[in-house]
Amino acid sequence: MLSEGHEVSVLDEDPEAIALLEKGSDRSWEDMGGSFTVGTALEIDALIEAGIERADAFVASTDGDNTNLVIAQIAKRRFNVPKVVCRVLDPARAEWYREQGLETICPTKTAIELVEAALREEASV
Amino acid sequence: MYIIIVGAGKVGWNLARELLDKGNEVTVIESDPARYATVEEEMEHAVHYGDGSELWVLERAGIERADMVIAVTGDDEDNILICQVAREKYGVERVISRCNNPRNLQHFELLGIKPVVSATDLILRLIEHEVPRYGMIHLLDLPTERLEIIEVEVAPGSPADGTAVKDLGLPDGSLVISILRDGTGFVPLADSVIEAGDEVLLVLDTGLEERITARFSAPQGQPEAA
């Protein structure tokens, strides 16, 4: 997103996580124009510090489905972020929350579909 | 009543015991295998193994016919989610949630999860009750109705000391409902005279505390013992 010219702010509870963002680049994440805040997703102060109040889009992609679902709803309802995307590994929860109007992405379902497509291709050969 | 409890920690397990004793049907859901095994020895089929925020686990526990769901895991996001799906997806009328970190109370509120029980908050209230600020104790808060009931102790030399209830000059939106004196309480008349050392119960609109406690505190600049 950064390389496409967007302003990107990353929030992570692990201060070392910034190293992942800089991997494969000789410049620091900040030099590349990104910003990084240490904190957990449910900390309102950390979200504000990361700039949620002026964000055009918010992506919830921690490794916890429930954390993502809660934080995405906070971004939407409390901070009125126009575009909110939420990663949910469990297909059942992803589907129900999508029905409730939350934009959820389910990597599990995507992977299943890809595998099915690969198998079908195999079968048709 | 059929009650589902998610989380078989100290709170969940003991709650389950109490509710079973009172004749309710109870299912507890626990996701930690070791904890599940321990609890299962006592509760047998009343405890289910699984992640209580997964829909199929809740369905297997019979959430569709549950009268109440209680989320008492150690994780606030999980508790929020469990209560949200219980109420909004499965139409469970009563949900109760535990809030582990009082800073998260605002998230429960935002998403309409209530009632919420926070041990930290309860202890804080108890501390306030034991060590009241300005001699004032919050007895009951009704935030939705914007009302509260407080108890204040009458300081010697305060404006209220020796004053009849009708002459207290309390702001609109407040009312003296009871006076406790020498261990007994009575409902005062307009002419009842308030004395130093009385404990006065008032019902008031939220936000009036400071104006009211001023009437019952010792005058500024004078030591209370004077």
Image (tube, coloured by chain):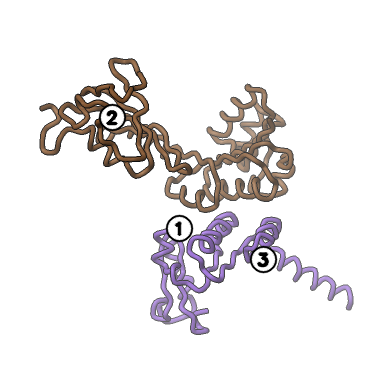
Chain colours: A purple, B brown
**Lower sequence index among marks 3 and 1:** 1
Residue B153 in the figure: left or right of residue A28: left
Judging from the image, mark 1 belongs to the subunit labelled A
Q: Are marks 2 and 3 in contact (CB under 8 Å)?
A: no
Q: Is residue B82 above or below residue A44?
A: above
Frontmost residue, A15 versus B147: B147
State which quarter of the image contains the C terminus of chain B. top left
Q: Residues within 10 Å of mark 2 (few under 14, many from 20)?
A: few
> Residue under circle 2?
B166
The quarter of the displayed image where residue B178 is located = top left
Check chain identity for marks 2 and 3: say if they share one.
Answer: no
Determine the residue positioned at 80% across, 72% down.
A117
Q: Secondary structure at mark 2?
A: helix
- Return the residue at label 1: A40
Please report, as a chain letter, where disc 2 is located. B
Residue that badge 3 annotates: A107
Name the amino acid type tagged 2. Answer: Lys
